[in-house]
Amino acid sequence: MNFHVMTLFPEMIENAMAESITGRAIKAGHISLNAVNIRDYSENKHNRVDDYPYGGGAGMVMQAGPVYRCYKDIIRKIESETSPKVIYLSPQGKVFNQDMAAEYAKEENLIFLCGHYEGIDERVLEEIVTDYVSIGDYVLTGGELPALVMMDTISRLVPGVLNNDVSAQTESFTDNLLEYPQYTRPEEWNGKKVPPVLLSGNHKKLAEWYREQSVIRTAMRRPDMIAKAELTDEEKLLAKNVMNSVTD
């Protein structure tokens, strides 16, 4: 997976991605990162990439020219037979979720366009953007944080990135269920003991407990997800009882 980020703050992207799991994945060659400074494609001596909006209004708008030249340079260097998806991070986009992350993880290249100020000239968006994506119904200063959120989520689904690939299959939102609770040493802490089943070594009982706890936690904390999950009749009853107990 090759990530290309069009941004005014490449160091912000590079520094964050160099840490933790994504940093190790970059070093191992499972993913790559190309953070490109849009200012490098300005054609004025001050490297400005913004101007006043036509029609008036507060704030500034990023110009089409620098963004387009930045995009074309990335495309030229990729040398792919197929045009990669260009994701514009915007509160007007479709809200990002785990299913979208799984689809994006299948791509060879992804280009993220990070806006700033009051936005980007609509004409270049019409020219290059394939996907409008939001990470939530709120407004941020720029697209860098949403891009980092998406790259982190997508990276975890790229083969080899996680030391244990099973982790990606059991985490929250997989199968529309939240992940079951986790415990570690010591066996007793503050008077609270680890559930006995986790000490049993019985893999069948463990699998059943994990599933049951995922259903319970989802019904309790995210009941909106339960309708999308594939549940047995027994699990549906369990979820219903949990949701009823929460509302009582």
Image (cartoon, rainbow, N blue to C red):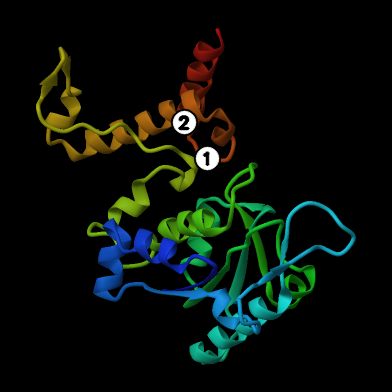
Query: Which residue sits at x=35%, y=62%?
Result: 15
Image vertical order of residue 110 relative to residue 141, above or below: below
* Mark 1 → mark 2, Cα distance in angstroms: 10 Å
Does the residue at mark 1 contact the one at mark 2 (Cβ under 8 Å)?
Answer: yes
Q: Position of residue 91 (x, y in %)?
A: 67, 50
Q: Is residue 210 above or below residue 13?
A: above
Question: Which residue occupies the foreground of this view, 103 or 136?
Answer: 136
The residue that mark 1 highlights is: 229
* Mark 2 secondary-structure assignment: helix
Q: What secondary structure is marked by label 1?
A: loop
Q: Is residue 226 left or right of residue 174?
A: right
Query: On the picture, is 8 further left or further right than 18?
Result: right
Residue, disc 2: 218
Crowd band around label 1 with a 10 angstrom C-alpha radius: few (<14), some (14–19), many (20+): some
The residue under the point 54% across, 33% down is: 226
Query: Which of the 4 image quadrants contains residue 122?
Result: bottom right
- The furthest residue to the front: 45
**Callout 1, which amino acid?**
Ala
From where the camera sits, is residue 156 visible?
A: no
Quarter holding the C terminus is top right
Q: Between residues 198 and 13, which one lies in front from this camera angle? A: 13
Q: Nearer the viewer, residue 15 or 19?
A: 15
| Image disc number at residue 77 | none
Identify which residue is drawn at 43% across, 61% down. 12
